Amino acid sequence: MPEGDTIYRAAAALRTALLGRCITSFIAPRLIGPSPQVGAAVEHVESHGKHLEITFDDGIVLHTHMRMTGSWHLYRHGERWRKRRAQARAIIETDEWIAVCFNAPIVETYRVFDARRHPRAGKLGPDLCRMDADLHECVARMQHYDDPSATIAEVLLDQRVMCGVGNVFRCEVLWATGVHPWAQVGTLPQSACLDLVLTAAGLLRANLNKVQRITAPDVSGGLAVYGRNGQKCARCGDVVRLTRHGEMARLLYWCPGCQAAFEPFPEPDWSDPIAHGMDPHPAATMFIKDVLHNRGPLAS
């Protein structure tokens, strides 16, 4: 499953092979937009989260979005491809290399001078894989999220907040920070948002040059919760759970034992305090309500 670190490495490899070289062939079945001309030179290769863009000197930008299935491969001429040609969504050839984009859901082009009209322009958050990413901007976007009731598990995957975090890193970041996946983003203090962003950036950058992702070096397999449903949590010994969450029903691995920070408590029904075994006096109702709302984030 491609995430920000994978796409970052792919862009680095493509830059090494393609930058400054003229293309001898460009094939893109079902391409949306104009095709770069044969003879055009590659000027830039950049990754931004799961987005990868290749800019040609004829003013065409190839934009690919990997989502959950896409990948870029590099081959020498005559080398056997690791996937079937029918899965290729874009093929760029030079005298030395063949760059192939497989199974990417989005493969489109636009012209440089129309970049501001592109539907995603100005919407993506900073790319955490970049060392110069503005992490405070990510925190600000999280704190001013357009839906304060959205769960933090959903917000971490929103590329408008920050780029690079996919499903694996989402689960691992939430575990590392101890934040409950269902915590509402509007209830998180600035310190918690900063902790989430710093942790995500740290884990992504630590994996930029690794083939196997490692977020918890002391855990067998290198991952603390992802793919470990039904196993004991390495931190608290509770059982790691698996559920589906969000609009896309993505798999979410988490530990209910130690991921309790900012856990959302159901709003109690205060209409009938006697039914709840409380003193019916208004002062008692206010006191109990304040106690519940002021419980520490790790209280159980």
Image (spheres, grey):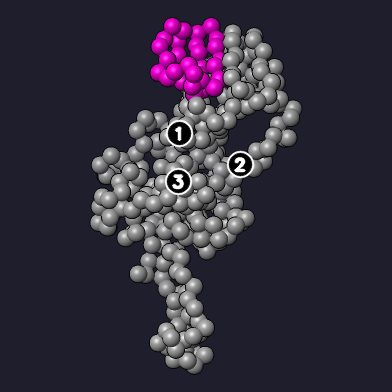
Q: Earlier in the sequence, mark 1 or mark 3?
A: 1
Q: Nearer the viewer, residue 179 or 149?
A: 149
Q: Amino acid at mark 1?
A: Pro
Residue 39 place in picture, x, y as percent: 64, 9
Instruction: Assign a secondary structure to mark 2.
Output: loop
Q: Earlier in the sequence, mark 2 or mark 1?
A: 1
Locate residue 83 relative to residue 57 in the image: left or right: left
Instruction: Assign a secondary structure to mark 1.
Output: loop
Q: Amino acid at mark 3?
A: Arg
Instruction: Report if residue 84 lies within the magenta region.
Output: yes
Residue carrying label 3: 250
Instruction: Report if residue 96 lies within the magenta region.
Output: yes
Tell me which segment is drawn in magenta.
73-102
Alpha-carbon span between mark 2 and mark 1: 18 Å
Residue carrying label 1: 2
Residue 155 place in picture, x, y as percent: 53, 51
Residue carrying label 2: 124
Q: Residue at x 33, y 53 (%)?
A: 241
Does residue 173 appear in this view?
A: no
Residue 100 place in picture, x, y as percent: 50, 19
Q: Residue at x 71, y 25 (%)?
A: 111
Does residue 296 appear in this view?
A: yes
Q: Earlier in the sequence, mark 2 or mark 3?
A: 2
Residue 47 place in picture, x, y as percent: 54, 31
Alpha-carbon span between mark 2 and mark 3: 21 Å
Q: Residue at x 36, y 51 (%)?
A: 242
Locate residue 248 relative to residue 53 in the image: left or right: left
